Amino acid sequence: MIHSYDEIYTPKAQTALAQMLRYAVEDLYIELNEFWDMFLISGVADLFGKGDFRFLVGMSGIEVAREVVWRLTGEWPQEEPTFRLEKDPTYWTGWILAWYQWYSGQSFRRISGFLTAEQVRDMYSPYHEMDPLQFADAADAIRRRKEMMTRLRMYRERRGFSQAELAQESGVSVRMIQHYEQRQKDLNKAQTKTIWLLARALHCSREDLMEF
């Protein structure tokens, strides 16, 4: 398996990402998934995951969080971090995601396609007491299940919609949604308007729903 950087740097990466999330959530009062999306959109996630030493060892987790906010808002957060000794679920989320990204060789963006930051936090118990390899096995199992899904279903579940709710929101019938999700019909061959209605309801692009 190819890693983006040497294993010797993983403890630093884990600490930085753990501090970043805890500062964002507990001191800046940003929801975990919201800040994780900011991390991805800002471009910092790609650089961090590729082993860019400016972020990996050149900054503390607090500074990485401030960099993310600055890139998206133009403002540098001034809030001082609260000192804590305990490694709570939010801290562990960053810690394990940094390790899993390094171990699996996947980008943070790809990982987020099948496992959100809040879902990882929900895995704190029992996985924080286990070997990280057991978390990796569980995450890989989730990825395999997600990859068996159509992208339409994946985005629907990410939005928290039932099929009926998506039908109501989009104007596409429940029956058609079922056909597309069960691959009885090919969404790639659907009318442009149908794909557009679904994408608009799911807050994604039409390309996001295409099967490859």
Image: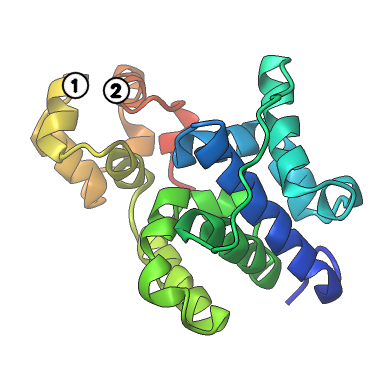
Q: How many numbered tags mark residues here?
A: 2
Residue 183 as seen in the image, left or right of residue 49: left
Q: Quadrant of residue 65?
A: top right
Where is mark 1, residue-wise?
169
The vertical placement of 11 against 97, above or below, is below
Position of residue 46 measured from the top left corner of the image (x, y, whole percent): 73, 45
Q: Quadrant of residue 104?
A: bottom right
Position of residue 181 measured from the top left corner of the image (x, y, whole percent): 24, 47
Disc assigned to residue 53: none
The vertical placement of 73 against 121, above or below, is above
Q: Nearer the viewer, residue 138 or 120?
A: 120
Answer whether labels 2 and 1 touch (C-beta < 8 Å). yes
Q: Amino acid at mark 1?
A: Glu
Position of residue 137 measured from the top left corner of the image (x, y, whole percent): 47, 79
Q: Secondary structure at mark 1?
A: helix
Position of residue 92 measured from the top left corner of the image (x, y, whole percent): 53, 62
Q: Nearer the viewer, residue 92 or 132?
A: 92
Where is mark 2, residue-wise?
201
The vertical placement of 81 against 198, above or below, is below
* Crowd band around label 1 with a 10 angstrom C-alpha radius: few (<14), some (14–19), many (20+): some
Report the residue at 19% width, 21% height from top.
169
The vertical placement of 209 against 183, above or below, is above
Residue 20 as seen in the image, left or right of residue 151: right
Q: Quadrant of the N terminus?
A: bottom right
Q: Secondary structure at mark 2?
A: helix
Report the residue at 11% width, 28% height from top.
173
Q: Nearer the viewer, residue 187 or 29?
A: 29
